Amino acid sequence: MAFPHDGNKFEPGETGNPNGRPRKYVSTLQAQGYKLSEVNDAIQALMSMDLEELKTVAGNPKATVLEVTIAMAIKKSIDRGSLYSIETLLTRVYGKPKELTEATGTQKIIVEYVNPADHPLSSTPSAAESP
């Protein structure tokens, strides 16, 4: 039963997703008052840890919310076998890798150099025109 309202998706003013789209990790942390540089530093430190160290941070009652949130995101990605959270965190710190595109085909591009003095719309007189 996909739609409970007799063929209509939703009544006016009603939504199918009352909580909205979940916030991203970094947005959540910034809303809690962390600076972007602090978030990036924590991501770098936690990404260099092994799984046992991550578990220790995630279960440490004295760890900051920032550390626990990032450690849990990394741990969740590893447990699910998904690289989405890890990729998101790495992109946040290091940026996206450079993408190269190769153009293949038989079309040719011809570049022709025109001396500005010889161009008919040029306002500068050519050497032949000067007295």
Image (tube, grey):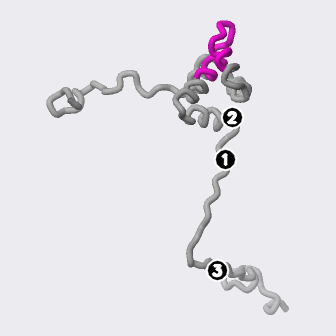
Query: What's the amino acid at mark 3?
Result: Ile
| Distance CA(mark 1)–CA(mark 3) | 31 Å
Q: Nearer the viewer, residue 86 or 55?
A: 55
Q: Residue furthest left?
A: 6
Q: Which residue is mark 3?
A: 110
Q: Which residue is mark 1?
A: 97
Dot 2 alpha-carbon crowd within 10 angstroms: few under 14, some 14 to 19, many 20 or more: some
Q: Which residue is mark 2?
A: 93
- Residue 95 image position (x, y, % from top left): 67, 41
Examine the rendered structure and indicate whether residue 16 appears above or below residue 122.
above
User: Taking 130 as reference, is 98 left or right?
Assistant: left
Examine the rendered structure and indicate whether residue 97 appears above or below residue 44.
below
- Residue 76 image position (x, y, % from top left): 55, 25
Task: State the residue at coordinates (50%, 26%).
Answer: 23
Q: Nearer the viewer, residue 2 or 125?
A: 2
The mark that comes first in sequence, 1 or 3, is 1
